[in-house]
Image (cartoon, rainbow, N blue to C red):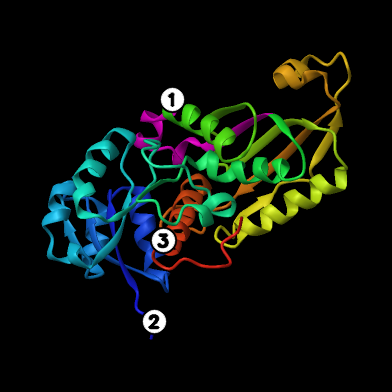
Amino acid sequence: MTRRHGAAIIGSGNIGTDLLMKLRRSSTLDVAAMAGIDSASDGLARAAALDVAVTADGVAGLLRLEAFDEVEVVFDATSAGAHHVNDAALLKSGRRVVDLTPAAIGPFVVPAVNMARLGNERNLNMVTCGGQATIPIVAALAGVTDVHYAEIVASISSRSAGPGTRANIDEFTETTARAIEMVGGATRGKAIIVLNPAEPPMLMRDTVAALVSAVDEAAIASAVASMVADVQRYVPGYRLARGVRVDAVSATDPRRRLAGAAGHLDLVHVTVFLEVEGAADYLPAYAGNLDIMTAAAVRVAEHLVIPTPEAVR
């Protein structure tokens, strides 16, 4: 029987608890410990009921747990500010860290795009929910043509935006925009998040709009479809909401300014509409924004402890 590798979770809120549920199904990872700061949290209660070692003393308490000796990788599901403190405390332990906050201490990782190149990093950053949903599409476009400008809009149910998400709106836009460029391959990137109060709650919906050098439309559609299939390997509820749209950009189109110095080239405008339905492990199905983060984080951690040759790109 293959040995399962020990994991710990910092943060006993919605994201941390959903991670707990997903990790219980992993054939590669086993949850050894969970740390929070609220002794009455549902996450710590559920973990304790599953015989997971728990502490309400945060990262300091985690380091004191006997079970920490079994841990190889730590998930941080707290906040950008807290992650700086947590990572500093974990540094001497030598444990690998998967950061689900926008702190971005370590390099950005999107499993379907660049995971295979980052297996030796100590701290990996999961960008943002919008980044996990849209950067694969930007990277798919960049694989067949030059992406001069890419703008993403992530629309999520306000019910699925907890205190951590709301406190990190600025970090979301800045971190996602940087990752669109650094991981997605766009020359310029922009990110917008919309918290939609609609009732009943809406599924996560994402729009990618990109100005790219003109290329065969079939190549664009094929690249996008292939990337969607790659992401579905670890986020089954990830899908195209409709067909890929490709529009010509005339010589006088004001959008050319967004392409900067490349605005004089033959350009097309590509629009991709996505939808993410959560697996409802702990969170409701409409919270695809949180589900894609936890599912992607588990995929990254599994690769860290057992590098897989089939890791895409």
Residue range in magenta is: 149-170
Residue 155 covered by magenta stretch: yes
Q: Which residue is mark 1?
A: 170
Residue type, label 2: Thr
Q: CA distance from mark 3 to mark 1?
A: 29 Å
Q: Residue at x 22, y 41 (%)?
A: 88
Q: Name the mark on residue 2.
A: 2
Secondary structure found at label 1? helix
Q: Position of residue 304 (x, y in %)?
A: 41, 61
Estimate how packed mark 1 is, as few (under 14), some (14 to 19) or many (20 or more) residues with alpha carbons within 10 Å. some
Which tag, 1 or 2, sits closer to the chain's start? 2
Label 2, residues with CA under 10 Å away: few <14, some 14-19, many ≥20: few
In space, the residues marked 2 and 3 are separated at their CA atoms by 16 Å
Disc nearer the start of the sequence (3/1): 1
Q: Residues within 10 Å of mark 3 (few under 14, many from 20)?
A: many
Q: Nearer the viewer, mark 2 or mark 3?
A: 3
* Image quadrant in which you'd find residue 45: bottom left
Of the image marks 2 and 3, the number of the one nearer the N terminus:
2
Distance CA(mark 1)–CA(mark 2): 43 Å
Q: What residue type is disc 1 on?
A: Asp
Is 46 situated left or right of 101 in this image? left
Please name the amino acid that badge 3 sits on: Leu
